[in-house]
Image (tube, rainbow, N blue to C red):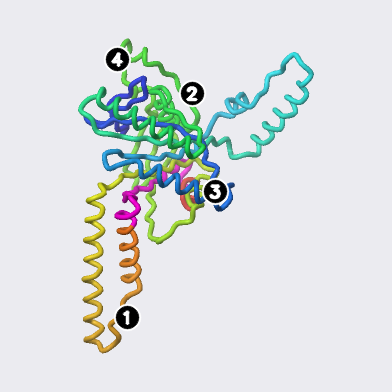
Amino acid sequence: TIPYLAMYPDGICKVTEKRYSKCVVFEDINYQLAQADDKTAIFENWCDFLNYFDASVSVQLSFINQGTQREQAEKAISIPAQEDAFNSIRTEYSDMLKNQLSKGNNGLVKHKYITFTVEADNKAAAKSRLSRIETDVLNNFKVLGVTARPLSGYERLKVLHGVFHPEGEPFSFSFDWLTPSGLSTKDFIAPSSFRFGEGRYFRMGRKIGAASFLEILAPELNDRMLADILDLETGVIVNLHIRSIDQSEAIKTIKRKITDLDKMKIEEQKKAVRSGYDMDIIPSDLATFGSEAKNLLQDLQSRNERMFLLTFLVVNMADTKRKLENDIFAA
């Protein structure tokens, strides 16, 4: 249920016997507020960023809307008084922030992470490669104008604890406790219970949740789609699992698909001749798919772009089944 083998203080996670990962937290990209030209530049830089990852690296983008305890939020925005003449300004500003908190986004805190995973025979080999990737990822974020930093093992466990305890229960853990207690890191992050077997629903502690996948049928997507999902004032986790396809294999796959589409086109033309109508009239979907496949092949061959497999998952959590269904419908 918690699928990893070990978490280390340096932030490396042993996922399976030969798979290791690291995680970087990053801040918002100021995309929606940018001008059209700036949006194009940001998008192109983001494409370059994704093209960095080859077929040997698995990438996961995680966007977590997480509830926080009100006391913690108020403490974070409280401005202590000082021995000068500006305490009235501090008080006024602090009161304004508290007022915004009271009518804000239901105490939700939004976090964004990128996790990258490689295969290696041991942790030492994985650490060397993950460190290089981490440096490149941080540099790519710097180009995008985004603040980012790697997570330690403690911080990664704290993130997982927050996911498994959406009520906001505080996280208490130290790596020094593991040896004397004989416990593993999972014992400090696991919820009170897991229960599956209710169709698409599951229960985690006192919460009920459901995981949904997004099937993308449209040829184009609005750049607001992900932002609209994350703007919902509900506890939601969005995971984008991205796997780059080897360039030569991707080109072969697209060429095979084009050949298949050409065969289908010939069959449709034969049917047209037998039925006595214009052989140039073929199903519009067939023509569209053929054109899109050829454009994709050109991008792979001449623009050095990569082909990716994407799994888009959305997890909703709520106190009741009715609230959960409403949240899923809203998404």
Q: Is residue 146 above or below residue 186?
A: below
Q: Is residue 158 left or right of residue 303?
A: right
Task: Tell me where residue 166 appears, x and y as whole percent.
Answer: 47, 33
Disc 4: CA contacts within 10 A as few (<14), some (14-19) or many (>=20): few
Q: What residue sits right under mark 3 in the picture?
A: 38
**CA–CA distance between discs 1 and 2?**
65 Å
**Foreground of the two, 21 or 258:** 258
Q: Tag 2's secondary structure?
A: loop
Disc 3: CA contacts within 10 A as few (<14), some (14-19) or many (>=20): few
Identify the mark nearer the N-term, 1 or 2: 2
Q: Tag 4's secondary structure?
A: loop
Q: What residue is at 48 percent from the left and 35 percent from the top? A: 142
Label annotation for residue 281: 1
Q: What residue sits right under mark 2 in the picture?
A: 170
Quarter of the image that includes the N terminus: top left
Q: How many marks?
A: 4
**CA–CA distance between discs 2 and 3?**
40 Å
Identify the mark nearer the N-term, 3 or 4: 3
Tag 4: amino acid: Gly
Foreground tag (1 vs 4): 1
Label annotation for residue 75: none
Farthest residue, direction bottom: 276
**Foreground of the two, 42 or 279:** 42
Identify the mark nearer the N-term, 1 or 4: 4
Tag 1: amino acid: Ile
**CA–CA distance between discs 1 and 3?**
42 Å
Q: Tag 1's secondary structure?
A: loop
Foreground tag (1 vs 2): 1
Q: What residue is at 26 percent from the left and 24 percent from the top? A: 123
The range drawn in magenta is 299-322
Label annotation for residue 182: 4
